[in-house]
Amino acid sequence: MTTTNNKVMTTQEVADRFNELARQEKWFEIQDEFFADNVRSIDPPNSPYFGYAEGRQAVRKKGEDFVNRVEAVHRAYTTKPIVGGNYFSVARELDFTVEGFGRIQWNQVWLYEVKDGKIVLEQFFY
């Protein structure tokens, strides 16, 4: 469990820390700090880019495979999280060049589910 002062972090606290790291583009640090062992990562059905991964290692590999294909980042922006219940979401804008796809401009919504201070689900909408 992710804790602060021996207390399980709330969804708001996880979202706040997520925001702090996201503003620094520290995505793997977010995974290390918050992803549960059984985390699931879901992209839209029929996505030409990514699909589904389950478990910390598989989700990490999905992220690493993505980063390794990025040739250039022209613009990246993440909004502050919006929290509702055990969920929070952010909007993410990316303008980047990806090997095999060329230049892509993405406007996405990312949804996260938090349980016991850990992220158990990340889902991408684009």
Image (cartoon, rainbow, N blue to C red):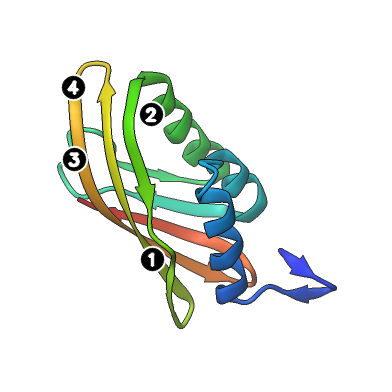
Residue linked to disc 4: 101
Three-letter residue code for mark 4: Phe
Nearer the N terminus, badge 1 or badge 3?
A: 3
Residue linked to disc 1: 89
Nearer the N terminus, badge 1 or badge 2?
A: 2
Q: Residue at x 71, y 63 (%)?
A: 2
Left or right? Give the position of 66 relative to 61. left
Q: Is there a contact, CB below 8 Å, between mark 1 and mark 4?
A: no
Structural distance between the alpha carbons of marks 4 and 3: 13 Å
The percent coordinates of residue 15 (x first, y second) are: 53, 66
| Helix, strand or loop status at disc 4 | loop
| Helix, strand or loop status at disc 3 | loop
Label for residue 66?
A: 2
Left or right? Give the position of 48 relative to 56. left
Three-letter residue code for mark 1: Ser
Residue furthest out toward the right? 5
Structural distance between the alpha carbons of marks 1 and 4: 26 Å
